[in-house]
Image: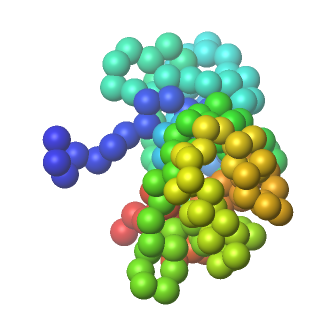
Amino acid sequence: MEGEEKREEYAYVLDFMLSGKSFSNRPEPISQLLGEEWFTLLEATPKPNAALVLGERVYIGKNERDKILLIKTRISFNELTQTSRNELPNLVMKIVRSNEKRFVDMFNNAGPLNIRQHSLELLPGVGKKHLEAIIKARNEKKFENFADIEARVALLQDPAKLVSERVLSELEGNERFYMLTKPYRPRL
């Protein structure tokens, strides 16, 4: 399986346009989705007569799909509709909170990027002092959940929010390093 691109299995509905985009010359239903694993932004065609609800979790894997007919393309943050942009922060936070173990493990296992910077410093608000406190606390005992991180690392507030803010920043495409998302590469 080496070299095979990892694909999303599930996604959340960011927007559902029954008659497509307003500037499109083909009025077909379109949905914008947020992948659950890699926070991939996607545009999809729903199955005929499928009713999609904002925030709904839908299957988009390789097997039979119940609501999504076709994944059309991967899109950039700039291609999101205003509705999608409004939904995005809430859905990112929902994914982070519902996959707490995955992100707590990131705090427990993250290492340095290079000799000058640690990957945890990519999280907004985490500087050298917070980094030292996080590493000291995790070396004493691995973190169990977000509340444990918040309780044991002085002045570090809401680790789930820090992770969500980092995901949003990476999705906007302004980062040098990507630790939580797959960077968007424009099609040529």
Who's the residue at 81% across and 56% down the image? 157
Residue 152 horizontal/vertical position (percent): 73, 52
Q: Position of residue 122 (x, y in %)?
A: 60, 70
The reply to whether residue 163 is visible in this rendering is: yes
Q: Is residue 137 above or below residue 176?
A: above
Q: Is residue 126 left or right of residue 59?
A: right
Give the x, y percent position of residue 160.
71, 47
Q: Is residue 161 above or below residue 172?
A: above
Query: For this rendering, which residue is in front, 178 or 59?
Result: 178
Name the image quarter holding the C terminus: bottom left
Q: Residue at x 43, y 30 (%)?
A: 9
In this image, 102 relative to 23: left or right? left
Q: Nearer the viewer, residue 16 or 96?
A: 96
Q: Residue at x 66, y 54 (%)?
A: 163
In this orientation, does residue 93 appear?
A: no
From the viewer's perspective, is residue 54 above or below residue 2? above
Left or right side of 31 for 8: left
Image quadrant containing the N terminus: top left
